Amino acid sequence: MSNIYNQGLDKVAANSQPLTPINFLNRTADVYPEKVAIIHGEQKITYRQYRNNVRRLASALVQRGVKPGDTVSIIAANIPAFLDAHYGVPLTGAVLNSINIRLDALAIAFILDHGECDILLTDTAFAPVVKKALALCSRKPLVIDIDDDVECEEAECIGDIEYQALLAEGDENYQGNFIVDEWQSLALNYTSGTTGNPKGVVYSHRGAYLNAVGNNMIWPINNQSVYLWTLPMFHCNGWCFPWTIVAMGGTQVCLRQVEVNAIVNSLIDHQVSHFCGAPIVLNMILNAETELLDKVPRGISIMTAGAPPPATVIKGMESRGFDITQSYGLTEVYGPCVVSEWKAEWDQRNDDERAALKARQGVRYPTQENVDVLDPDTMKVVPADAETIGEIMFRGNTTMKGYLKNDTTTMESFKGGWFHSGDLAVKHPDGFIEIRDRSKDIIISGGENISSVEIESVLYQHSAILEAAVVAKKDEKWGETPCAFVSVKAGKNVTESEIITFCREHMANFKVPKTIVFSELPKTSTGKIQKFILRAKVKELFGD
Amino acid sequence: MSNIYNQGLDKVAANSQPLTPINFLNRTADVYPEKVAIIHGEQKITYRQYRNNVRRLASALVQRGVKPGDTVSIIAANIPAFLDAHYGVPLTGAVLNSINIRLDALAIAFILDHGECDILLTDTAFAPVVKKALALCSRKPLVIDIDDDVECEEAECIGDIEYQALLAEGDENYQGNFIVDEWQSLALNYTSGTTGNPKGVVYSHRGAYLNAVGNNMIWPINNQSVYLWTLPMFHCNGWCFPWTIVAMGGTQVCLRQVEVNAIVNSLIDHQVSHFCGAPIVLNMILNAETELLDKVPRGISIMTAGAPPPATVIKGMESRGFDITQSYGLTEVYGPCVVSEWKAEWDQRNDDERAALKARQGVRYPTQENVDVLDPDTMKVVPADAETIGEIMFRGNTTMKGYLKNDTTTMESFKGGWFHSGDLAVKHPDGFIEIRDRSKDIIISGGENISSVEIESVLYQHSAILEAAVVAKKDEKWGETPCAFVSVKAGKNVTESEIITFCREHMANFKVPKTIVFSELPKTSTGKIQKFILRAKVKELFGD
């Protein structure tokens, strides 16, 4: 279409710049240079120092040959270097690959190879597993130890240079100028999918910027906010909060150990106003010593996701003055992008009704253009009757670019113009979404996704096991744990503890089935294992 | 550069959608269908009704031939139809051209012609001037009367159809699907520049989305907020607040008359939490009857811009419990995109220091990538010494696309990769910007920009006037008023009141000089009038 607006109104430097969360740090460091950006134990880092560290990191990496499109991996607890990496790595145009610290060496090696890691930043606390992983993988990245005064026996330097020495190589006035297109890749986060090998979810600068802004729209932060890092930063880049908190000029409190006393003491000592975490973290806090808990200031805002928090946990935390917001998302949508938005008129409802309303996953962030429950066959939106089950699908700017080097799965997951989450849900008459069944092959335990298929493939390696199928079992503490159904080969014998020991040797600890049920496996006429029957059996055996 | 991130990670419907503020209304109407979106006198419009009206408007316009890139102009007070237009017009892909209700017929006619108006929505309260304008211009737009039960003698229907009848033609389920690129034009706002004819500033969907989000980041709104429309919506689309408030699910209170009792009563009756306005509005409120003022709830947030509010006004309002945020911007940057961000540590300063800090224009919004004070000759940033004067320049996503059909001025204003504001300022050691001299040829009176050049060109038409130059004169009530220096032709006579009467006949009332000084005009050796000498003379004659 030709019209008067098509002439002389083009994009130029003055009116068009790539959206990138890097810019948030520049702004806040300019406005609040002396404000404390990061607290880590006794250490206080101002915004000026934070930006200087970021610039040093970026320039040192560039001097050591990092180029746009390279992969810089990091395995670390919630420590300042991880926050540096959220700005310093993207500033070079490279991609930040945050690796789950709970993975075993084999899984880490797979990620280093698949993600084509060029540089690895590794927290000395995880030296043993990383050393093994490096031996297993074919990549030979430059390894940088983050020696963060860890008081643990296993801490050890295994790399080429220590992090502080690397920073010393850098220039604190470094500007970088590698983000020329907001679609450039910023982050690579591996997720356990329904298949055995993890998939590499790629984020853009644009998406990260927008989800960072969206977090603030539904869960306001300001320059007086103090945010405690209970949520692992390796989960969807800490749900994009390293960018949100900085954009709003808040203070981030690091925390190496997600352990109840450390959390509660941090809440008290730093007058924390906000934190995020899986329901298990809420439950931990609720079970802290009453005396300690009484000292926690009221009015702390919590965002929880990963699984709907049990009503008792919501009620317990609210009676202690915590303000809970439930959100929902996946690695593929930058962490949370659905929120159980609270309506003022619901304040009047009774406890049970309020807990039920709060347990619903909710509605989309303003920054995600569309979230709905669709019938995956017809791609039509299901009726909002709180009964018809469909699949939660996303369409908008906070959906991943795709899976790295995995065109087939990317295209499949984007079929019909929507991202297919695999999560089954209903839509209430008021438009709020409620999950009825998490993705068939994912078990969420303590906030971690576990692939049932991955466990099954290990079980099948056991010489005595004929067939295996793994489903979720409800768990008071962990939300869910893996429960394995196995049938034994004719003439063979095996015990529950033998199987569990076998699993421990072949997968990360958190993935190991807590329960083994010996049984024939129900199948369809075509021989497919009927997991829904197994799920029903779990409820029958162990209660709902 | 070729790397693993360049393959199979493309933009598709699922992960890439155009940023547009239209989407905010969809989200809020989905989540809060029964919530009151708009209050207008006795009328309460829910978000469901609001979206229905918007969809009806869009579909009726499309049925009547409106296409993407057409111009739909509106002349209206702060009434619901104007809020409809902020979504309904962009939904068709057409461009919303909001016209200043204070302009005279000639200026309106110029805008209708220059903007190539296809449809004109006109509030019946402004029938007389619009009728004249339509007679003067060569465009013959479809004219839609907004008959909003105006209680004024001059109200009259002059168009082809009334607004409600137009809505009745429309479809409340209409979706529209015309925004395929976020760079598409959304709004056209004419601004008095330094040249006689107004310039048409063009906004994109992307820029409007981002400034709407930016407003909320620096001045938080939530779904309990009640926003009163004291700021004219025709000013930079109400500084993008029609999009911000809706994004956050707040309620907008319309107000036809910006008159002190109406404002104060609205604050009380609707428990208003937020409003915007030029300092003159603050001053009006402060001078309301004490009895009435005592009933106004404390804690109302005010954003003020247009001119730095006098310290006495700030102090007076704060003592009444209002919370004032000063912002700064121009039509060319979507209204405000600089904010006098308040630091908690300043709370301790004394009244005078606090007022001085608050009077500074401040720092950029997080959503504008760069704002700085540059030497326009060298294009280098001035030292942050609070002394060196430079020009405020902008570079980022909330800078206009350009001036409509005015490539030369667009290119000039974007020279060197920055938008040149024309405003002169210093930069304080803490990075905060403070204006030292507004653009040389702009007078800001009651929040309206007046071009001195435009007044001068009228003065030169007077048969007795030899030379004329107009500068700003400080004014307790209006901030500034135009002061004209004129020299009289040999053998001619003219009085101050004759000149003022002549001006009244040739320009909008608010532009008419309040003061005429008869004098020789000081000139440079090349014959250029030295306005800085005239400004000094104004101070000498009338005080600072």
Image (spheres, coloured by chain):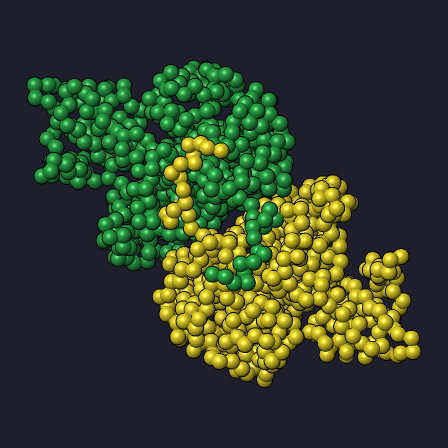
Chain colours: A yellow, B green
Q: Residue furthest right?
A: A491
Q: Relative to residue B85, is residue A360 drawn left or right?
A: right
Q: Is residue B458 visible?
A: yes
Q: What residue lies at 45% left-to-right and 52% top-to-bottom?
A: A18
User: Residue B184 at x, y = what percent?
Assistant: 47, 39
Where's the C terminus of chain B, which quadrant?
Answer: top left
Q: Residue furthest bottom?
A: A153
Taking depth in this image into account, of B361 and B371 the one nearest to the observer is B371
User: Residue A468 at x, y = what percent?
Assistant: 82, 68
**Above/below status of B129 relative to A393:** above
Q: What residue lies at 47% left-to-right and 76% top-to-bottom?
A: A163
Q: Residue furthest left?
A: B491
**Above/below status of A213 relative to B99:** below
Find residue B293 and report its image quarter. Answer: top left
User: Residue B484 at x, y = what percent?
Assistant: 19, 29
Taking depth in this image into account, of A488 and A300 the one nearest to the observer is A488
Q: What residue lies at 44% left-to-right and 32% top-to-bottom?
A: A3
Taking depth in this image into account, of B453 and B426 the one nearest to the observer is B453
Taking depth in this image into account, of A74 and A224 the one nearest to the observer is A74
User: Residue A416 at x, y = what percent?
Assistant: 67, 46
Find residue B509 and report its image quarter. Answer: top left
